Amino acid sequence: MATKSPSLFEAVAADGRPLLQLTAFALLFSGCFAFFVSIRREFLPHDIAYLAMRPDQLCALAECRVVAFMFHDRVAFGGVLIAIAILYFWLTAVPLGDGAAWAWWTIVISGAIGFLSFLSYLGHGYLDTWHGVGSFALVPMFLAGVVRSHALVRTGPWDLVLRRLAVLAGALRLASIFVFSLSWNLSNASCISA
């Protein structure tokens, strides 16, 4: 009796870990790109558009310390992306491969917070296409990896507790994003009216 060969998706996705590792690789690449742009001291097009200033105008402010801070911030962001990528590589290869529920929940909660925090860009109007396209391309891959890798998880008595904590953490994160966006919009409105 002939066995059915797996589809391309099944072959690539396997148990979900390759999709999560591909997500980690994308984060690693993005972090390295942030380093590269900062080392070259280049502004991205959306930086200039949002600030409505040329780089020389911005550098004229505060002895160019604003520009230095912007590049420092971008390096810090790149470093965080690289650290998360390394963590995801290890979590998917070692503890999740052994069926550790905590590793799966760590990936789920940190990914949910990371992707949901992207919505905070909407609160202050700094939504650029680079971050948008990258995030929206990674979300389906990340979700498919999370769903498929759940079969690896050994369930135990703490599984229900962890699920409830994950729901609570997500609700708190959404509430904090809402409050931040609301306070940002109110502070901008008071600055405009003053």
Image (cartoon, helix red, strand yellow):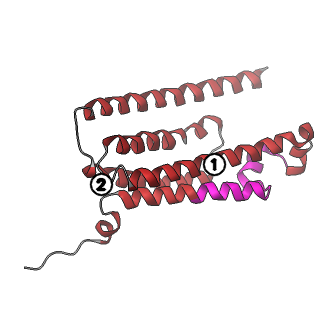
Q: Which residue is mark 1?
A: 79
Which of the marked residues, 1 or 2, is nearer the chain's N terminus? Answer: 1
Residue 144 visible in the picture: yes
Quadrant in the picture for residue 111: top left
Residue type at the position of mark 1: Gly
Relative placement, left or right, of 135 versus 68 is left
Q: Count every numbered label the image shows and give the total.
A: 2
Q: Quadrant of residue 30?
A: bottom right
Label 1 neighbour load within 10 Å: few <14, some 14-19, many 20+:
some
Rendered location of residue 105, percent (x, y): 36, 41
Asked whether 23 or 154 is in front, the reply is: 154
Q: Main secondary structure of the magenta part?
A: helix
Residue projecting furthest to the bottom: 2
Q: Is residue 168 magenta?
A: no
| Residue nearer the viewer, 41 or 94 | 94
Q: Nearer the viewer, residue 112 or 32?
A: 32
Q: Is residue 139 visible?
A: no
Q: Which residue is at the front of the view, 139 or 101?
A: 101
Tell whether position 48 is magenta: yes
Which residue is drawn at the image coordinates 38% and 27% (left, top)? 168
Q: Residue at x 39, y 53 (%)?
A: 92
Residue under label 2, please give it: 148
Quadrant assignment, res 21: bottom left
Query: Which portion, as a residue range, is magenta?
Result: 29-54
Q: What secondary structure is found at the residue carrying circle 2? A: helix
Amino acid of disc 2? Arg
Left or right: where 98 falls relative to 18: left
Q: Give me the disc on residue 90.
A: none
Camera-near label (1 vs 2) is: 1
